[in-house]
Amino acid sequence: MTALESSGLKTTPAAVAATSPALLVRAVGGGRQALLPLLLGVAVVLLWQAAVSVLAVPPFVLPGPFDIAAAFFANLGNIVSASLVTGGNAAVGLVAGGLLGVLAAVVAAFLPVFDRLAGPLVAALSVVPIVAVAPVLYTMFGAGEEAPRQIVAGIAVFVPVYVNSLRGFRQVLPVHRDLMRSYAAGRWQVTRSVTLPSAVPYMFTGLRIASSLAVISALIAEYFGGPVGGLGKSITSAAAGSNYTLAWAYVLGAVVVGLVFFCATAALEKYSSRH
């Protein structure tokens, strides 16, 4: 059923013909938006390969993208297995840190005292170096546990989600709350109808930023111990064995994992905006 039919108006061939050019223009515009970044990426890869070939850059300095792609597909099984380990830890950290960030922002929005107390702690968390936290957590939980990597990812996620969510809760104009109270709406009704809808876009902005941070943090935490099998350990092992092309192939796997996380949060944001 078309938009005209759902509005109670009958569609005619003339009306359909009138809307077709608009749909065609929209489709062409969307195709251009997707094509231009793709062409730019292809151009960068070709220039990279040409520079490596013409300048005879040794592989330990910078391998060519074609060699990296060949190593990537030749070791696809190992890369996928390592990506699942790193991605799993990043996902746990993203969910846990995101939920804690939103809950803390809710409490801070309704309790100014908590906001003043939590402000310095959040500022401190934002500058905590991962390279210092990971070894301490491995000592606390044990070198064979994945929990330290998940905690590191959760810390990295918590800060942007908390800051953006709290800003979203504060965007509601006082006149809107006064209008709801004039209709005898309770605090929960005001929160559900006014505060949360205004804060949702800010929450997802924080999640999109945090999705990449979760992958990066989980990856870096693997450099400082823990079980073998993640992308970080695989990169260091390949580099230590002077197999730099394979190390770059694992880096490419990390890039793919980061893109998957970013696209997933962006799709979730788009879905929530429609509902």
Image: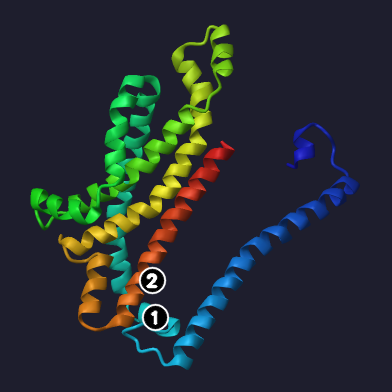
The structure residue drawn at horizontal position 50% and vertical position 24%, both measured from the top left corner, is 195
Circle 2 SS class: helix
- Residue 73 percent coordinates (x, y): 38, 79
Q: Amino acid at mark 1?
A: Ile
- Residue 104 percent coordinates (x, y): 33, 30
The structure residue drawn at horizontal position 55% and vertical position 45%, both measured from the top left corner, is 270
**Mark 1 and 2 residues: CB-CB less than 8 Å, in contact?**
yes
Q: Nearer the viewer, residue 4 or 185?
A: 185
Circle 1 SS class: helix
Is 48 placed left or right of 94 in the picture? Answer: right
Is 128 placed left or right of 66 in the picture? Answer: left
Q: Amino acid at mark 2?
A: Leu
Q: Quadrant of the N terminus?
A: top right
Residue behind mark 2: 252
The structure residue drawn at horizontal position 53% and vertical position 76%, both measured from the top left corner, is 44
- Residue 180 percent coordinates (x, y): 56, 13
Residue behind mark 1: 68
The structure residue drawn at horizontal position 82% and vertical position 49%, both measured from the top left corner, is 19
Q: Quadrant of the C terminus?
A: top right
Q: Quadrant of residue 215?
A: bottom left
Q: Is residue 39 above or below residue 14?
A: below
